[in-house]
Image (cartoon, helix red, strand yellow):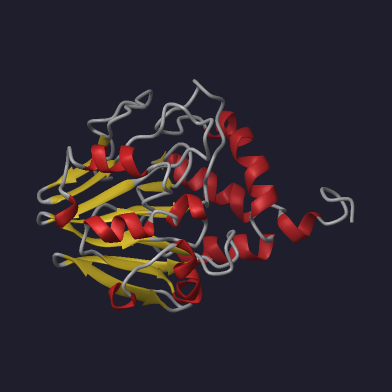
Amino acid sequence: MHAVGKAAPAEARAADGVVLFEQGEHRWVWLGADEDEDEGVSANQFLVQHGGRGCLLDPGSVLDFARTVANLSRYAQPSELDYLFFSHQDPDVSSAIPMWAGITTARLVMPRVWTRFLPHFGEYDQKRMLEIPDAGGRFTLAGAPLEVVPAHFLHSTGNILLYDPTARFLFTGDIGASVMPHGKETLYVEDFERHRPYLEGFHRRYMASNVACRDFVRRVSRLSIDAIVPQHGAIFRGPQVGHFLSWLEGLRCGVDLLGEMYGA
């Protein structure tokens, strides 16, 4: 088990970020969350660093931009970012692409199926794209390997995750997202059964089907995972990883619920 969260107690929700993992020149940082969620969907942004270079995960919307840049500056400069990783096309993930492209020289990592829609967010340089095929792929951050794992239809038809074998962290985008009561947010899940109600509504509505859920669990079961890090809500670590994956594997959702949830 790696040193996960040594600087981040379970109750931490620091507005300016928290170091989640640090080993030598390799580090993961949670870049905080907006204290006022009224203007949009509250989202997590994460920074992976190795050898002084960085990869920013799901950088967020135009609403997140100023806060994320300010918090990023505590740990890295925009000029030190080599990659901006976008798990899918939703605006809470990617609507600030032109703003990030303007202050960095980073490559934009995104599922190939969605890259043709990016001009709708504004101007960017197509030559900076690192398009990820449906089967996934790999790239390196200052020599450290990072693996791109496909998770189609969860919930996006083109959806990718990032696995870091050094930290044993799996960034899952919307998979594992939780909607927690305002003021009750925690950084980590400590009791899965108590946390489960915060997962259920979102996953039943937004994940496509149990077939897609089982395919995801099958794909990631080969990985050594110390923490699952979603775009929204709390982080799963240690035994909570297995609890979440077991729950998701058996979840009926999306088209499984036609006629029950949607009145079809």
Nearest the viewer among 219 and 15 is: 15
Nearest the viewer among 127 and 214 is: 127
Residue with the most extreme front position: 123
In the picture, measured across the screen, residue 226 lies left or right of residue 25, that is: right
Residue 155 x %, y %:
59, 59
Identity of the residue drawn at 64% across and 56% down: 207
Residue with the most extreme top position: 183
Give the quarter of the figure containing the C terminus: bottom right
Identity of the residue drawn at 69% across and 61% down: 209
> Is 32 placed above or below 216 here?
above
In the picture, measured across the screen, residue 87 lies left or right of residue 84, that is: right
- The image quadrant that residue 87 belongs to is bottom left
Residue 169 x %, y %:
33, 52
Residue 63 x %, y %:
43, 42
- The image quadrant that residue 179 belongs to is top right
Count of all numbered marks drawn on residues in the image: 0
Can residue 165 be seen from the camera position used here?
no
Identity of the residue drawn at 32% across and 67% down: 108
In the picture, measured across the screen, residue 236 lies left or right of residue 142, that is: right
In the picture, measured across the screen, residue 124 lies left or right of residue 106, that is: right
Nearest the viewer among 155 and 16 is: 16
Can residue 256 be seen from the camera position used here?
yes
Give the quarter of the figure containing the N terminus: top left
Identity of the residue drawn at 48% across and 76% down: 116
